[in-house]
Image: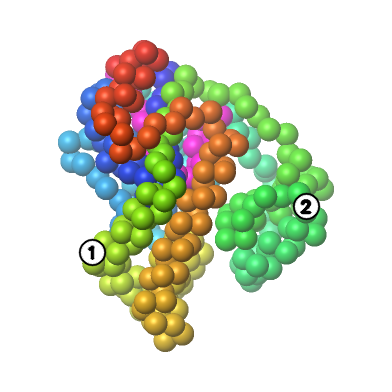
Amino acid sequence: MKVVVITGPTGVGKSKISISIAKAINGEIINADSRQVYKGMDIVTAKEIDSQISHHLFSFKDWHEEYSVYDYQRDCRMKIAEISQRGKVPILVGGTGLYIKAALYDYQFQTGIKKDYSNFSNEELHQKLQKIDPDNAIHKNNRPRLEQALNYFEQTKKPFSQKPKNNKLLYDVVWIGLTMPREKLYHRINQRVDNMITNGLIEEAYDIYKKGAINNIVLTPIGYKELFAYFDKKQSLDVAVAAIKKQTRNYAKRQYTWFNNQLPLKWFMVGEEDVVKKIIAHLEVKNIK
């Protein structure tokens, strides 16, 4: 069973290019972004849908519903099977690397009772993990991963960083990575944040803020928590927007590090002439048509 993956850092242009690829190879797109599964978070997650292409696992959960990597693994594999049975090509598109690995590799989840860490801040969770697993490389804002690592230690008494890696692929995968020069990407990220503000990010964030049920789901994507501080009159709008841009650039940098260490991507330079044609030619060599 053949699967195409199109990934890369935030802001590089995955959505637009993947839509062009899907049209060219009779494909259907499966979301691989952990926040685009939620309804009402369209601007902050930069959703881009084309009515001419079938899209899956977008905007089907309410923003107060938990949706785990395990849930995604199950749902994504089901969609891969359905799309393949229709004679079309499943194309995973997004920047959440753990979702991609969980879906495509023989990724086994730890079973057992999970501890409730809801009363701990991200910083506190990170400090707890550092004490038991100082070699971990999990960012302090990656709360789901922090909780996963802590639960792994509770269940196995072994550091998560020493967890055996399973590199067995379940599918015939063609790996596509989209990149561009770092300065150009950062400029593009800054412009995208400005466009998000113009297109209604403040209003989208305030709609959630005024409901008063702030949880980890809405605090994870970059954009909301910075604006919540503005709504609380703790900082100006200019400072909030600058923080969104800085955090997004830092996130893109962390994504590059993760992709280079975890996925066997064939990188293509966005902005080069005929980049879509080059990707299609590569897919044809891999017998994806």
Q: What element carries label 2?
A: loop
The residue shown at (41%, 43%) is 181
The residue shown at (47%, 19%) is 172
Q: Could you tell me residue 142's position as x and y percent? A: 57, 56
Residue 155 seen in render? no
Q: Label 1 amino acid?
A: Asn
Q: Earlier in the sequence, mark 1 or mark 2?
A: 2
Q: Is mark 1 on a helix, strand or loop?
A: loop
Between 190 and 217, which is closer to the camera in this rendering?
A: 190
Q: Which residue lies furthest to the bottom in this view?
A: 233
Q: Label 2 amino acid?
A: Asp
Q: Is residue 65 above or below residue 289?
A: below
Between 193 and 218, which is closer to the camera in this rendering?
A: 193
Tell me which segment is drawn in magenta.
86-105
Q: Could you tell me residue 246's position as x and y percent? A: 46, 63
Q: Is residue 250 left or right of residue 110?
A: left
Between 243 and 4, which is closer to the camera in this rendering?
A: 243
Residue bearing mark 1? 199
Residue bearing mark 2? 133
Q: Could you tell me residue 46's position as x and y percent? A: 32, 54
Q: In this view, does 64 lie above or below 138?
A: below
The residue shown at (54%, 32%) is 263
Q: Could you tell me residue 85's position as x and y percent? A: 34, 20
